Amino acid sequence: MKEYIYTIDGNKYEVAINEVNDTTAKVTVNGAEYTVEWEKPVEEKPVVKVQPVAAKPAAAPATPTPAPAAAPVSGNAIKTPLPGVIIDVKVAVGDTVKKGQTVVVLEAMKMENNINADRDGKVTAIQVAKGDTVADGAVLIVIE
């Protein structure tokens, strides 16, 4: 179960996400239980994960990528607290971030959620892009 506190127009809401299925979620808002339903998008974009690939001899030159091909996924990873769609990535590889700074904006259940850095550091990898669909617990950013 994931628990959050949202403030909307000055009103506080204690939200617990109890169970998430394909098109429904069971949530508790300020003690009242609800079943939230949503329609599946007509065309879902798959999450693309970059994996290192051994260079092939006599192949065409590879196009350089802005982020490292494979970032270490360790305790320094910022992960998504719930499934959703990436609306915006607010940082770039090499940026220095402060604890509490918004690094990614995630849309989940028709709400925009700011995902903040949990420590000061330097962004060493970005694992998502705007428009990506991500699962609960997916790595978004790596901060060293």
Image (tube, rainbow, N blue to C red):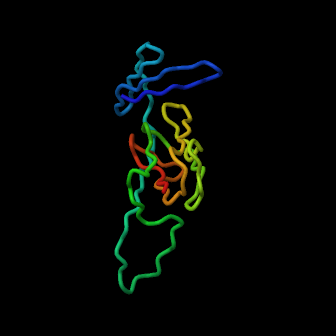
Taking the spot 57% from the left edge, 50% from the top edge, the residue there is: 89
Residue at the extreme front of the image, as rendered: 120
Question: Looking at this view, is 109 or 123 the one in front?
Answer: 123
As drawn, 33 above or below 49: above
x then y, percent, for residue 26:
38, 23
x then y, percent, for residue 15:
46, 23
Point out the image quarter for the N terminus: top left
Question: Looking at this view, is 98 or 41 the one in front?
Answer: 98
- For the image shown, how many numbered marks are present on the structure? 0
Residue 136 placement, left or right of 120:
left
x then y, percent, for residue 96:
59, 56
Residue 113 placement, left or right of 51:
right
Taking the spot 41% from the left edge, 22% from the top edge, the residue there is: 27
As drawn, 84 above or below 45: above
Taking the spot 58% from the left edge, 58% from the top edge, the residue there is: 92
Residue at the extreme right of the image, as rendered: 9
Residue 51 is drawn in which quadrant?
Answer: bottom left
As drawn, 69 above or below 28: below
x then y, percent, for residue 8:
61, 23
Residue 87 placement, left or right of 82:
right
Residue at the extreme bottom of the image, as rendered: 58
